[in-house]
Amino acid sequence: MTRVAPAPVVASLAEQLRAVLRPDQVRDAVSEVDLYRRDASNMTGEASVVCFAESTDDVRRIVEVANAVGVPFVARGSGTGLAGGAVPPSGAIVISTAKMNRIVSVDPVNRLAWVEPGVLNLDLSTQTAHLGVHFAPDPSSQQTCSIGGNVANNSGGPHCLADGVTSSHVHAVEVVLPDGSVTILGGEEPEPDGYDLRGAFVGSEGMFGVATKVCVKLMQNPPGVATMLLDFADVAEGAQLVSDIIADGIVPAAVEMMDQLCLRAVEAFIHAGLPVDQAAALLIEVVGLPAEVAAHVERIRTLADHRSVGTIRIAADDTERALLWKGRKSAFGAIARIKPNYYLHDTVVPRHKLPDVLAQVYEIAERHELLVLNVFHAGDGNLHPLLVYDAREPGVADRVRAAGDEIVRVSVGAGGVLSGEHGIGLEKRDLMPLMFSDVDLDAQAALRRAFDPHLLSNPDKVLPRPAGCGDLHSVAGTMDGAWV
Amino acid sequence: MGVSLATAVTEFADEVGTTDPVTITGTGSRGGPVAGTRTVVAPTGIAWIEPAEMTIRCGAGTTVAEVDDALAEHGQCVAVPTGGTIGGALAVGHSGIRRLGWGPVRDTVLQVHYVSAAGEVVKAGGPTVKNVSGFDLCRLLVGSHGTLGFLADVILRTRPLPVHECWYRTDGDPWELLGALYRPVSVLWDGASTWVLLGGHPGDVDAQARSAGLVEADGPPVLPPYRWSLPPAALGELRSELPGTFVAEIGVGVVHHRRPRPRREPDAAIVELHRRLRAEFDPTGRLNPGLDVLAS
C-alpha cells in the first residue's frame, strides 16, 4: 500500500509531538505504527504516528498539534472494536489511552467512580468488588476492552438487559474536545445545566473528542442469583419463550441464546455438560432478593413448559454458574475449532421477530454455502450471527460479505436496527441509509459539526460520505486473518 | 389499535413552518410556551403498545396520564414523571422521585420524530431498546426545552409495574439506609426524617423494611417548589440547613428546596458547545426564541 503522507511530513509531525511529550511517548517507526492499522475488525487504515498519552494534558497537547498541522487523530483504547471505529484515518495520529489506566477515585456510598479511559472493563468490577459493587456493562471482550472504548461505542453485554448499556452507567466524561479545549460533559450531579452533552458524547465513536476521565455508575451486587440453562428441540420455541417472559413482566438480568452448532463448539472447548443434541439453549439469569428470585425462577419454569422446554438446569453454586457463563463468553474462541475465520454480525430485531429472523439467517447462510452459529443477547433481540469460514477458500470472502449484507437488511426490514452494541464505524457506515433518510443523517452530521467543526476527530466513520470523495480506507479489502 | 401518527406528524411540521418564530406547549404544567410567540401543539394519541417488546409509541402531545392508564392495562408503566404531556416531560428532562431505582427519564426514549427549525421531520434513534446506530440525538433532545427541535412522536421503553410498592419513614441516617438496602426505589431526606420507597416481591419488601427498622408511611413528603441539582456526595452539606426547608433525593442529588437555586456560571467550553449546537440546529433562533437552556 502506498503511504498517503510522504516521509518528510511524517517526521515533522513526530518531531512536533516529541516537542510537547516525552520522546518515548511518540512512535513513528513503520514497524510500530503498523501495529495500529486496525482494530478487531478486518479493516485497515494508515496512521502516521502513535502517541501514548499518560494524562489529560498529554491528550490536549497532541490534539493541539493535530489542529496546528491539520491532521486527523483517533483515540484508541484496547483496539477490541469490531466495526473499524479505531481504524486510523489516513495519516492520522493515533492517541493510545492504554497507559491512562488508573482508577482515580471511588465513592462507595453514592456508588460512583472516576476512572481513566484505559482502565479495562473487568478490572473496574474486580477492583471494586470488595465494596459490593460492579460496572454493569459486560461485553464479551470485558477482560481486554477499555472503559474509554465502552464510552465510544456505548457498549452493551449480556447483563445490559435489565440495567441498560453504557450510556446508562456514565455520569460524566472529562473530554479533550476536537479544538483542544478541556471540559466535563455531564457531572456527578443528576441534572447538569443545558443540553445532555454527556449523552451525545457516549456512543459517538471517537468523533466528538477524546475521553480522558469517565465518571461511572457502580451497581450493587445482587444478594441472590439464579442462573438457568434451558434447552429446546426447536430454536423458534426458545426464541418465543424470550418474548413470553418479558410480556409476563419479568425482566431477567440476562437472557442469552446459543444454537446447536455453537453449543457443540463450546462444549468441545470447555466441557460444561451443555445440551449438544438440542437445537438451542437459553442461558437466563435472574438476580435480586431471595423471594423475587425464587418467584421468577418458578414463573420462568412454567412459561418454559408451555414452550416444550427439554431440560432446565439451574447452577447449583458459583462454580457451576461461572462455568455456564464461561461457555457463553468463550463462544468466540471456541469457534476457531470449526473454521479458522469468522465474521461476527450485530443487529437488533424486535423480540417477537426473533423466530422469523433467525429462520431467515439460517436460510441466508445455507444459500451462500456458509456455516452460521448464533450466540446472542436474546432478551434484547440483539442477534450475533457468526459466519464461519476458511479465508483460504477461493471466493468465500464475497459470499461472507453478501450473506452479512442480507442479514443486516433482513434485520432492519423486520423493524430492527443496524447495530446493537458494536457501533457503525466503517463497517456499517454505508448502510446507515437503510435506517435513516438524508434529512436524518444531516441532523447527525450537524451534531458532529457542533463538536468538531474542523472534522479532525476520527473522521470518515459512522456517517456515509457523499459520493466522489474517494475512498481512503480499504473498507472492502481482503479479509485477512481471523476476525477476533 | 391506536391512532395513526404519520399524517398528524406531517401536519405538525407544516404548522411549525420554516421561517417565523414559533413556540410549543402541552398542558402548560411545566412552564408553558414562550410568551408572545405563535404557539403550536404536538400530535396526540397512542399509536401502539407492544407489551412483549416493552415499548409504546405515542404523539408527544399525549398526556402522561393517558400513557400511564393505557400501559397499566398491560401491567406496565414508564419512568416519566406524572403530569402534563410526554413531550413536555421530555423537553424539560427532569426525572421523577423514583430515579434512584428507575433511572433517569432520558433513558426511556428509544426513538423520536421531531420537527426541525427548517420544518422538516427528522427521525432520531431506533425502535429497539438496544441500539447504537448513529449518534444519540435522542438524549440530546431530552432536556433541550424545544430549542433544537419540537418533539412530534416518540417511542418509549416501558417497565413492568411493580408487583408491590410501599413507602416507609424513619429517623435513620439516609446514607446508612442507602448502603444497607438493596436497590431502594427512592430515599428522600429532609434533614430530620428519611422516607424510603421499596418495591418488588412483598416478602422481600417486608424483610428489608424489618431489617432496617422502617415504619410504613402514607407516601412521600410534600416537595418544596424549587429544584436544585447537586453531586450526591454534596448532600451532606445540607445538614447545616433548617430541616424541612428541603427534600433531598439521596444517592441521586436532586434537591427540592424552598429557595431558588443559586446561580452558577457554566464552563466556557460548555457555553461554546451550546452556541454551536444552537447555530447548527436552529441558526435563526426561531424555536422557543429567547429561551436559554443553560439557565432553565
Image (cartoon, rainbow, N blue to C red):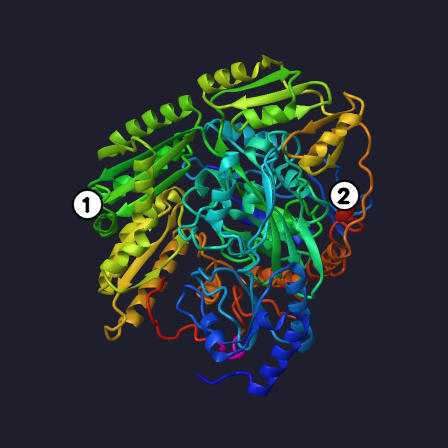
Left or right of A209 on screen, residue A339:
left
Q: What residue is shown at x 69% (from left), y 38% (from top)?
A: B231
- In reply to whether residue B243 is colored magenta, the answer given is no
State which quadrant residue A249 falls in. top left
Q: What residue is shown at x 64% (from left), y 41% (from top)?
A: B90
| In this view, A66 is above or below A386 | below
- Distance, label 2 to label 1, CA atoms, is 59 Å
Amino acid type of the residue tagged 2 in the rendering = Ser
Which residue is tagged 1?
A276
Task: Note whether residue B11 is visible.
Answer: no
- Residue A282: x percent and y percent? 30, 40
| In this view, A308 is above or below A121 | above
Amino acid type of the residue tagged 1 in the rendering = Val
Whether labels 2 and 1 share one chain:
no
Q: Can you tell which mark lies on residue B296?
A: 2
Chain letter for the residue marked with disc 2 in the picture: B
Predominant SS of the magenta segment: loop
- Residue B189: x percent and y percent? 69, 24
Q: Which residues are magenta?
A: A467-473
Left or right of B293 on screen, residue B76:
left
Say which quadrant the C terminus of chain A sits in: bottom left
State which quadrant residue B26 falls in. top right
Chain letter for the residue marked with disc 1 in the picture: A
Residues at discs 2 and 1 in contact (Cβ within 8 Å): no
Q: For mark 2, give the secondary structure.
A: loop
